[in-house]
Amino acid sequence: MNHSKFAALTKYNLPPGQFAITGSGPLGIRNLKKIGDIDIVVSPELCDILIEKYGVTDDGKVKKIIFPEDNIEAFWESSFYTQPKDPDAPTTADIITEAEIIEGLPFATLEVVLYFKNKMKRDKDLEDIRLVEEWQRKKNDEHKTNSRP
């Protein structure tokens, strides 16, 4: 369902350890929902390279780098969090470092996804929260069933 979008990202050969797929991407790779685009967070080094190549779009609320052909948007530490920063919020560096590698790509953990979706609480975020929590319950139930003697 979403694999063509993730395949499009691989053609950019972004350096490992300098980006992670966030937003709804971690739900998309688990086939919990069909995603419309791919959001990534990037390291300062990769950010500089991408800005030089693609420039910055600023809509007055958020700054981002838009990959012109593939519906991919990149964010960096000060661009993707538009509310007052919570001191406990995962940083871009945390998200990248703790990313889960799935099918060769780094994805923000579901805990990180839930953190930010709970902060924003838009209608689409509430639906994503429900999907993730339901998926986690199923995985937990499967684990309990499989670990019984």
Image (cartoon, rainbow, N blue to C red):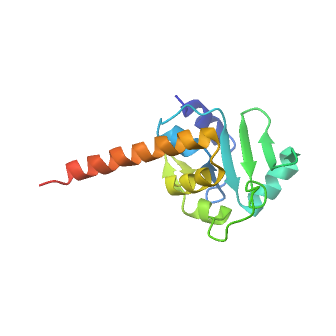
Taking the view exactly as shown, the residue that stands out farthest to the top is 1
**Residue 55 x, y percent position in the rendering:** 87, 47
Q: Nearer the viewer, residue 95 or 102?
A: 95
Taking the view exactly as shown, the residue that stands out farthest to the left is 149
The image quadrant of residue 116 is bottom right
Left or right: 66 in relation to 128 = right
Q: Which residue is depicted at the point 83% across and 49% down?
A: 61
Taking the view exactly as shown, the residue that stands out farthest to the bottom is 87
Residue 103 shows in this picture: no
**Residue 126 x, y percent position in the rendering:** 56, 43
Q: Which residue is depicted at the point 81% across and 54% down?
A: 49
- In the displayed structure, 145 sits above or below 9; it is below
Q: Which residue is depicted at the point 72% across and 33% down?
A: 70
Q: Nearer the viewer, residue 54 or 126?
A: 126
Residue 15 shows in this picture: yes
Left or right: 130 in relation to 65 = left
Q: Quadrant of the C terminus?
A: bottom left
**Residue 50 x, y percent position in the rendering:** 80, 50
Q: Nearer the viewer, residue 23 or 98?
A: 23
- In the displayed structure, 18 sits above or below 145; it is below
Q: Nearer the viewer, residue 109 or 88?
A: 88
**Residue 80 x, y percent position in the rendering:** 74, 53
Q: Which residue is depicted at the point 60% across and 50% down?
A: 117
Number of numbered callouts drawn? 0
The image quadrant of residue 67 is top right
